[in-house]
Image: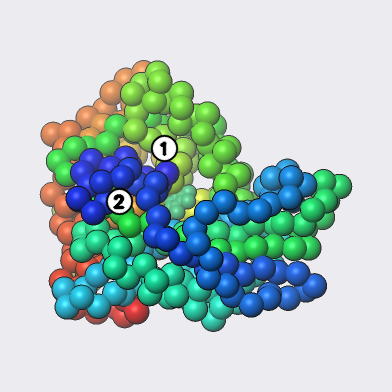
């Protein structure tokens, strides 16, 4: 699951995040050096040979994006081109065949059209999950890319994950890495698998919601969302490098914050700076599922450091609301993000 757990769900999306699906998905196979035609198939079990490359050597990547119902009823997808471009970059990092952008766009739009009646009103949305897997039947291919692949686009109606008044509890992990310095930018299951035991320990021992990975004090991101420090005038976040996932929500928050007059500072910073900043400022996590979530407290070396009054700070609320209004068509699409 991504980002924070759902606090509320609308009637249409009462199921927990990611557990309800529309009835149809699109699927394409890669073989003989090319992508074969796109099919529409019912959402259900996939026949997969037990020797499939993905099951042994982790050849898989995915995307997560949303389609929103506008006030006039029209459905629009948020930053589709950026998500497709990132999917292709992940595929390249996994040595998987890159699905062409026009094929991906057609596959995603078809799933949205087929699921039209199941798309909840905003702040709910249709969450889209393009997934690419290596399907070559060869357990001897540990050191070779999968010569065959499959891509499919799954869709899940989702509710509103905004954590309301609750600030998240975040464990600061300053030793372990979530991924590796070069692979953190790939949106791939392996990175989640790599982070999971740290997340489980944080939940069990500290009742934390998420882990903020800060190897040797370098503040990177949590298991599934990017990290911001915010105050009345400024936003501070790590500059893009290959160690962490380049969030499209991160980019959207930065663009919107600049537009609202905030100074955006992209530089590396340390755990000590977090502690200083939250004496007066705010901290937040960004990602597609929950948009922007406020941090209520950090836990570090067994000590608790509360952020503000422990709830979601005013600037976090303001930026979150601005982005959510734009995504759902309540304010003009000034940056051309909806299509
Ligand atoms: C998907 C993801 C994010 C958030 O990216 P968005 O494009 O904003 O949804 C952040 N970190 C990780 C590790 C992710 O997988």
Task: Name the residue located 34 percent from the left edge and 33 percent from the top edge.
Answer: 209
284 or 105, nearer to the observer: 105
Task: Name the residue located 46 percent from the left edge and 27 percent from the top edge.
Answer: 200
224 or 173, nearer to the observer: 224
Secondary structure at numbered mark 1: strand
Badge 2 is on which residue? 290
Q: Is residue 76 above or below residue 25?
A: below
In this rendering, position of residue 309 left or right of residue 5 = left
- The numbered mark at residue 212 is 1
Disc 2, ligand 1: is the CB inside 8 Å?
Answer: no
Task: Name the residue located 45 percent from the left edge and 75 percent from the top edge.
Answer: 110
Res. 268 in view: no
Between the C-alphas of marks 1 and 2, the distance is 16 Å
Hey, which quadrant is residue 208 in on the image? top left
Rendered image coloring scheme: rainbow
Res. 290 in view: yes
Q: Is residue 262 above or below residue 311?
A: below
Mark 2 nearby-residue class (10 Å; few <14, some 14–19, many ≥20): many
In this rendering, position of residue 216 left or right of residue 329 = right
Q: Where, quadrant-wise, is the C terminus in this rendering?
A: bottom left
Q: Where, quadrant-wise, is the N terminus in this rendering?
A: top left
Secondary structure at numbered mark 2: loop
Task: Name the residue located 25 percent from the left edge and 46 percent from the top edge.
Answer: 14
Question: Where residue 35 sits: x, y (%)?
Answer: 68, 75
Mark 1 nearby-residue class (10 Å; few <14, some 14–19, many ≥20): many
């Amino acid at each position: 699951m991504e980002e924070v757990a759902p606090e509320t769900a609308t009637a249409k999306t009462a199921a927990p995040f990611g557990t309800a699906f529309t009835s149809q998905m699109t699927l394409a196979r890669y073989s003989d050096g090319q992508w074969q035609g796109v099919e529409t198939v019912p959402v259900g079990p996939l026949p997969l040979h037990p020797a499939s490359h993905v099951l042994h050597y982790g050849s898989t990547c995915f995307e997560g994006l949303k389609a929103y119902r506008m006030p006039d009823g029209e459905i629009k997808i948020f930053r589709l081109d950026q998500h497709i471009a990132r999917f292709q970059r992940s595929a390249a990092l996994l040595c998987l065949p890159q699905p062409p952008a026009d094929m991906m766009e057609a596959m995603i739009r078809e799933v949205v059209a087929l699921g039209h009646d199941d798309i909840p009103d905003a702040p709910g949305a249709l969450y889209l999950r393009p997934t690419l897997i290596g399907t070559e039947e060869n357990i001897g291919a540990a050191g070779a890319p999968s010569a065959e692949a499959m891509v499919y686009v799954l869709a899940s109606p989702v509710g509103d994950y905004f954590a309301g008044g609750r600030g998240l509890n975040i464990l600061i992990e300053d030793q372990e890495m979530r991924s590796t310095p070069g692979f953190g930018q790939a949106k791939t299951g392996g990175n989640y698998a790599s982070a999971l035991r740290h997340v489980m320990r944080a939940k069990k021992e500290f009742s934390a919601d998420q882990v903020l990975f800060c190897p040797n004090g370098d503040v990177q991101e949590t298991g599934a969302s990017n990290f911001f420090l915010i105050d009345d005038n400024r936003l501070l976040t790590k500059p893009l490098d290959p160690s962490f996932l380049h969030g499209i929500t991160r980019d959207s928050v930065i663009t919107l914050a600049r537009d609202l007059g905030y100074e955006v500072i992209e530089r590396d910073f340390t755990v000590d700076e977090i502690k200083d900043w939250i004496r007066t400022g705010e901290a937040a996590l960004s990602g597609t599922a929950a948009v922007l979530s406020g941090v209520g407290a950090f836990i570090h070396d067994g000590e608790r450091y509360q952020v503000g009054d422990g709830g979601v700070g005013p600037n976090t609320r303001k930026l979150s609301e601005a982005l959510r209004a734009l995504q759902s068509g309540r304010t003009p699409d000034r940056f051309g993000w909806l299509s």
